[in-house]
Image (spheres, rainbow, N blue to C red):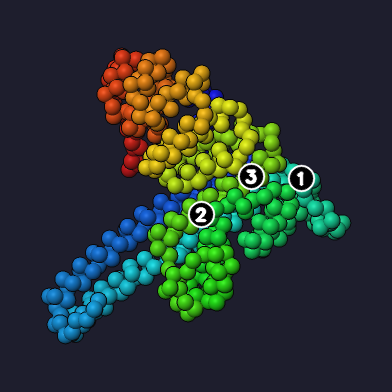
């Protein structure tokens, strides 16, 4: 790919101080890291808890088979009589099992709460970045300070932060619909028509509210919110019932929040700072490339459709074509090769940089042509890294054409290099 295309990995740093002005790109990248961590951590935590429950269950079975007398067996339950000297151990095992079982229910709720609250914090930081970018957008008529208050705040910077926090807090008190209506009116940009998961987002926020205020018990308000946004309801969801949070539901909510956070940031960013397209394109390219590397193809497709079909302006032609290549490969690895081919066919790649031509040949499974282009490109450390790391080449790397050409170019056989972190004792 062209040398001036965005880096392949996200910056690991993030905004550290809420009081410091930061870029919109920093905020969206930092938020994505946060919710990626939540998504990964939940799966690991559930796996550990499931293992604990299974081990406790095995211990209970062995204990009651040895020290108990089976009285009755029904669907899902066995009744035992236990001698007095074993009662304490029996109760201890039952409590351990109940705790593990309860944790499997409560933990996903906690992660959903974290997901929603992280989005609220992200929205606050995004607003801060927007106001630092366009301070004149802060309405002076609603932000008048008395002389006494100015003396209390002691400095211009403190006064500025006070007014900013006051404005942001007012927005955060609104419902999601009110917040996005305010954003659209304030910054004169259409947001919600591009948010495919807007109904699901509102449902997730309402479900989270029900966990916080109603212990997950379904109310008529929850039913009304779902109907208002056209969210289909399972037949088991009735007033008085309990709302679950399965791993599948959390993953769906994670993808929903991810999409809304990234699209909202980029629509506002490009609206308010149209001369910053280079940074905006790099930010979006990096995130979508990372999604492809992690095999999160559906989410990558949503954002790359957005990058190529919704966003009309890019930093340059190379940037636009880089998005097209990533979009095509996301569809290909998602087993939608017909769409991949259609995407590539809509642009003329003849005369483009040879690395673009190589990408197209690889995505079209024309490995012979790809090998010839490899030879033309030649050897460089950057290209060697691309051959090893880029998901674009993951099938091509397995072919005899690639292995032979690689050895011819670099004068060494191709071997996979794995970087394994050292464990701290």
Q: Which residue is mark 1?
A: 135
Which residue is located at x 41 percent, y 39 percent? 338
Q: Which residue is mark 3?
A: 267
| Quadrant where the C terminus is found in the figure | top left
Q: Secondary structure at mark 1?
A: helix
Asked whether, in this view, residue 415 is left or right of residue 168, the answer is left
Q: Is residue 230 visible?
A: yes
Query: Which residue is labeled 2 in the image?
Result: 256
What x and y, as percent, mark residue 125?
63, 50
Separation of residues labelled 3 and 2 (CA atoms): 17 Å
215 with respect to 267 (left or right): left
Q: Is residue 173 left or right of residue 286?
A: right
- Say above or below: 262 vs 87: above
| Residue drawn at the location 56% of the way across and 43% of the way down | 306
**147 and 371: which is toward the camera:** 371
Count neighbours of disc 3 (C-alpha within 10 A) and say few if under 14, some if 14 to 19, many if 20 or more.
some
Position above or below: 169 against 82: above
Give the structural element (helix, strand or loop) at label 2.
helix
């Amino acid at each position: 790919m062209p040398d001036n295309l965005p880096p392949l990995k996200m910056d690991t740093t993030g905004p550290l101080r809420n009081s410091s002005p930061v870029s919109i790109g920093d905020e969206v990248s930092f938020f994505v890291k946060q919710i990626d961590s939540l998504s990964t951590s939940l799966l690991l935590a559930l796996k550990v808890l499931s293992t604990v429950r299974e081990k406790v269950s095995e211990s209970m079975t062995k204990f009651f088979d040895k020290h108990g007398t089976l009285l009755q067996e029904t669907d899902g339950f066995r009744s035992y009589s236990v001698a007095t000297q074993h009662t304490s151990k029996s109760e201890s095992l039952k409590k351990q099992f109940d705790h593990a079982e309860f944790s499997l229910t409560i933990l996903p709720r906690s992660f959903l709460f974290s997901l929603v609250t992280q989005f609220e914090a992200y929205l606050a930081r995004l607003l801060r970045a927007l106001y630092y970018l366009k301070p004149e957008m802060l309405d002076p008529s609603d932000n008048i300070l008395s002389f006494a208050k100015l003396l209390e705040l002691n400095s211009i910077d403190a006064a500025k932060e006070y007014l900013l926090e006051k404005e942001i807090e007012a927005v955060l008190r609104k419902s999601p619909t009110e917040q996005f209506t305010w954003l659209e009116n304030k910054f004169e940009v259409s947001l919600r028509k591009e948010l495919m998961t807007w109904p699901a987002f509102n449902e997730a926020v309402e479900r989270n509210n029900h966990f916080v205020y109603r212990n997950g018990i379904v109310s008529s308000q929850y039913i009304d919110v779902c109907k208002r946004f056209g969210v289909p309801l399972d037949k088991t969801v009735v007033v008085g019932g309990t709302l679950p949070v399965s791993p599948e539901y959390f993953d769906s909510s994670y993808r929903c929040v991810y999409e809304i956070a990234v699209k909202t940031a980029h629509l506002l960013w490009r609206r308010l700072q149209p001369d910053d397209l280079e940074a905006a394109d790099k930010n979006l390219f990096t995130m979508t490339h990372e999604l492809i590397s992690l095999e999160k193809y559906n989410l990558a497709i949503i954002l790359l459709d957005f990058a190529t079909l919704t966003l009309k302006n890019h930093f340059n032609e190379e940037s636009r074509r880089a998005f097209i290549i990533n979009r095509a490969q996301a569809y290909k690895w998602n087993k939608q090769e017909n769409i991949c081919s259609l995407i590539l066919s809509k642009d003329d790649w003849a005369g483009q940089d040879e690395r673009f031509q190589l990408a197209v040949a690889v995505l079209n499974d024309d490995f012979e042509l790809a090998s010839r282009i490899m030879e033309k490109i030649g050897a460089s450390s950057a290209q060697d890294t691309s051959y090893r790391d880029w998901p674009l080449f993951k099938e091509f790397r397995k072919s005899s054409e690639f292995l032979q050409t690689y050895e011819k170019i670099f004068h060494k056989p191709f071997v996979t290099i794995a970087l394994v972190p050292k464990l701290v004792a």
